[in-house]
Image (cartoon, rainbow, N blue to C red):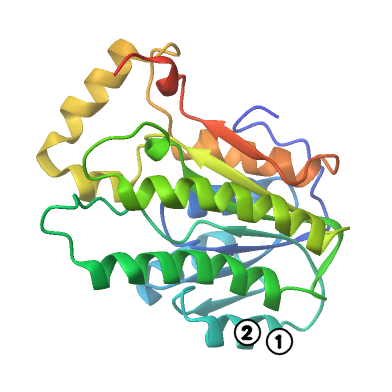
Amino acid sequence: MTAGKPNHALAGQTVVVIGASAGIGLETARQVRADGARLVLVGRNPERLQQAAQELEPLGTATFDATDTERVEQFFGDLPGPVDHVMVTAGGPFYMPLEGMDLAAASREFEQRLGMTLGIALHSRGKVRAGGTLIFIGGTGGRRPAVGLSVVSALTAALSALVANLALELAPVRANLIAAGFVDTPLSASLLGDQLDARRAELRATLPIRRVVGPADVAALAVHIMCNDALTGATYDIDGGQQLLPK
């Protein structure tokens, strides 16, 4: 499927997007809606979520933090009927070198990220139709060891293994992971600050695709995974060839 060219394969289906108020989640919601699906939008920021709802006219919205597993359980329990797909974009990278590491913060990151993934898998059982999929967002940045990447590297490996196992435990519901490299989102802008333009220029000059990966690229991959019911238990990289480059 080409970004921006819907084929309406999702027509009549219902998609829950968790993290729908900005970035990859919002763009995925837009493409899903354009492809004919109904939406349920979840986000932490009520103002941004309201703006997304005004644009996309979902069946419903919910405002909560996806790391709150009790709230996740309540959300899925309250859904009035079955859904076809759940897309989860909540969470971000955690960079911290061992020297000066806040161990409590690092431990919370493991607990929250893995707990969120397990919680959504656990509490969505019985709500996602057979052949539908849970799609989680991870990253590729931790695949090469570097100072400050201990936590993100461990989570990169753990999420891929976790989703592969969930595919077996949730079958015939599917589970898949999208591992994104740098994506030009508001989150990236907040992390890089005044270095953002330099990073964009570097990627345009060095990536094999000669452009920066954007939210629409990741959203198009997510929609393809939803539509292709032969895909489960796998991790799909989308980084414009960034991993092919020398350090």
Residue in the image at 24% along x and 19% along y: 202
Residue 77's disc is 1
**The C terminus lies in which quarter of the figure?**
top left
Q: Is residue 194 visible?
A: yes
Q: Which of 114 and 186 is in front in this view?
A: 114
Where does the image place residue 182, in percent across and percent down from the top left? 37, 35
**The N terminus lies in which quarter of the figure?**
top right
Report the amino acid beneath label 1: Gly
Question: Mark 2–mark 1 contact, CB under 8 Å?
Answer: yes
Residue 171's disc is none
Where does the image place residue 43, in percent across and percent down from the top left? 46, 70
Q: Is residue 212 above or below residue 154?
A: above
Q: Quadrant of residue 148?
A: top left
Distance, label 2 to label 1, CA atoms, is 6 Å
Residue 24 located left or right of residue 142: right
Q: Is residue 136 above or below residue 102?
A: above
Residue in the image at 38% along x and 39% along y: 142
Where does the image place residue 158, in percent across and percent down from the top left? 53, 52
Secondary structure of residue under mark 1:
helix
Residue 73's disc is 2
Q: Can residue 135 be seen in this view?
A: no
Where does the image place residue 78, in percent across and percent down from the top left? 69, 88
Residue in the image at 44% along x and 76% along y: 65
Report the amino acid beneath label 2: Glu
Binning the other alpha carbons within 10 Å of mark 1 as few (below 14), some (14 to 19) or many (20 upward) gives some
